């Protein structure tokens, strides 16, 4: 008797799930296109960040080049004197020179990492400001898919590109950003 009830109950469950209506189809795609490269390149804040990063890089290069030339001159002098120096003095001077050379390389690497970290932090701040702007433009256009312009092979109709609108709004909301060279280091995956 209990087997009959279990079979009847199982049949009822199976018949109700089979009768349930299929889920509604997804809405038709409404696509807009965004050029993320152009946003960083042509927005006021993107240009401001690029200008600052280029300035920091030029200053670092200038500072390190002057130190490098001084170190090269010292190396040439040391090489000329090496033959007449006592072995213990020669070893000390070579070790001292190599230590300064390594310190200069370390300073160059540290400065490069600081500039990259500052740029990464600036890019994150821009993307954070960009999120709500992008959502608003997408909503206004009634879109449900955003494609990066770099992924588009061909389009036969224009009017999908929202980049100029997004740049205009970003220019109003975030025209500048101060790049911080004391920013925490960028994650390894982002530095590549």
Image: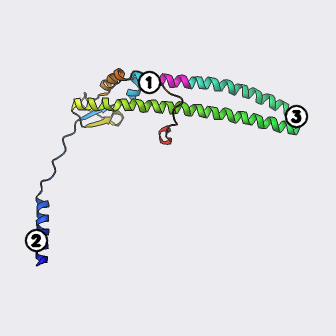
On the image, the x and y values in percent for residue 116 come to 52, 32
Q: Quadrant of the N terminus?
A: bottom left
Whichever of callouts 1 and 2 sits on the residue coming sooner in the sequence is: 2
The residue at 25%/35% (across/down) is 31
Horizontally, is 119 left or right of 101 in the view?
Answer: left
The tag on residue 104 is: none
Left-right relation of 56 to 30 = right
Kindly identify which residue carries mark 3: 85
**Quadrant in the picture for residue 68:** top right
Q: Which residue is mark 2?
A: 8
Q: Please tell me how crowded label 3 is: few (under 14), some (14-19), or many (20+) other residues with Cα within 10 Å.
A: few
**Residue sitting at x 68%, y 26%:** 67
Q: Few, some or many C-alpha atoms within 10 Å of disc 1 (few <14, some 14-19, many ≥20)?
A: some
Q: Earlier in the sequence, mark 1 or mark 3?
A: 3
Eye-nearest disc, 1 or 3: 1
**Disc with the residue nearer the chain's start (3 vs 2):** 2
- Work out how far the residue at label 1 is from the one at label 3, CA to CA, in angstroms: 55 Å
Residue 27 percent location from the top left of the image: 18, 41
Q: Secondary structure at mark 1?
A: loop
Q: Is residue 123 magenta?
A: no
Which residue is situated farthest in the front direction here?
Answer: 2
Q: Which mark is residue 177?
A: 1
Q: CA distance from mark 3 to mark 2?
A: 104 Å
Q: Residue at x 51, y 35 (%)?
A: 184
């Amino acid at each position: 008797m209990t087997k009959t009830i279990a079979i009847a109950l199982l049949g009822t469950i199976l018949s109700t799930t089979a009768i349930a209506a299929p889920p509604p189809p997804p809405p038709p795609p409404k696509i807009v296109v965004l050029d993320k490269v152009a946003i960083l390149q042509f927005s006021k804040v993107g240009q401001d960040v690029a200008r600052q990063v280029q300035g920091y890089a030029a200053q670092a290069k200038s500072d390190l080049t002057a130190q490098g030339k001084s170190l090269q001159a010292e190396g040439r002098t040391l090489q000329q004197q090496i033959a007449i120096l006592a072995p213990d003095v020669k070893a000390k001077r070579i070790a001292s020179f190599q230590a300064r050379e390594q310190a200069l390389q370390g300073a160059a690497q540290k400065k490069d990492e600081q500039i990259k970290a500052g740029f990464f932090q600036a890019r994150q701040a821009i993307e954070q400001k960009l999120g709500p702007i992008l959502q608003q433009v997408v909503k206004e256009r009634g879109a449900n898919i955003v494609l990066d312009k770099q992924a588009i092979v061909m389009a036969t109709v224009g009017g999908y590109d929202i980049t100029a609108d997004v740049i205009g709004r970003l220019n109003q909301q975030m025209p500048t950003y101060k790049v911080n060279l004391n920013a925490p280091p960028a994650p390894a995956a982002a530095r590549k």
